[in-house]
Amino acid sequence: MWNATTSRRRFLTTALSSGVLAGCSSSATRAGKLSASNRKAAPDFNLADANGSRVKLSDYKGKVVLLNFWATWCGPCKIEIPWFIEFEKTYNNRGFAALGIALDEGGWKAVKPFVTNKGMNYPVVVGNDSVAELYGGIDSLPTTFLIDRDGGIASTHVGLVSKSEYQAEIVHLIAS
């Protein structure tokens, strides 16, 4: 589980040694935008939401998905979440879905009140080490993947990027 002490130590050690705590700041790193023919398939996962319902990425095939790894203690994550709420409202009827994977040490005890307080209108699950590793090892938060309708990773963002950049990518993927 992500909430294990060793996981937290490993995350902090990796973050400090590689200087990626900047990801939890206003700077961003992009793994790049990939053409449709070069996209790697986004790994599937099966995690429970706060009500115990199972959430699988594969259930969203045919939609453009914004998959956001975040935590309640992450300042840049708190900036992005209102954007994602707005995107969910604006683009949901056009084949878009936002999904959040919280990587909080406190699990649902920390995450559930945060989700309620922020009025998050999209599915949120609590992640674990296995899911983080499927996505290349999440070393910095926020880390966000934009996934095309075929399940391919169209772009990856590590750290805070602008709302307009997300919006432009979402609109482009919806139109594709």
Image (tube, rainbow, N blue to C red):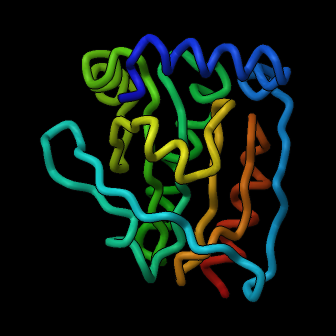
Viewed as shown, does residue 31 lie left or right of 108? right
Vertical order, 47 against 141 (above or below) = below
Q: Is residue 16 above or below residue 53?
A: above
Quick check: 152 above or below 19? below
Looking at this view, is 135 or 76 the one in front? 135
* Residue 175 place in picture, x, y as percent: 65, 84
Which residue lies at the image location 65% right of the left edge and 68% below the top edge?
153
The one of 4 and 62 positioned closer to us in this rendering: 4
Where does the image place residue 60, in percent across and percent down from the top left? 38, 72
Residue 78 quadrant: top right
* Residue 3 quadrant: top left
Return the x and y of residue 92 as percentages of the image width and height.
43, 67
- What residue is shown at x 79% (from left), y 55% (from top)? 165
Give how far across and how far down residue 89 sits, in percent: 44, 57
Count of numbered circles on the image: 0
| Image-based side of 61 in relation to 87, left or right | left
- What residue sits 58% from the left and 52% below the top? 135
The quarter of the picture where the N terminus appears is top left
Q: List the single residue furthest toward the left.
A: 52
Image-based side of 78 in relation to 110, left or right: right
Identify the residue shown where x is 40% and y is 38%: 127
Q: Nearer the viewer, residue 135 or 104?
A: 135
Q: Is residue 62 above or below residue 171?
A: below
Q: Quadrant of the C terminus?
A: bottom right
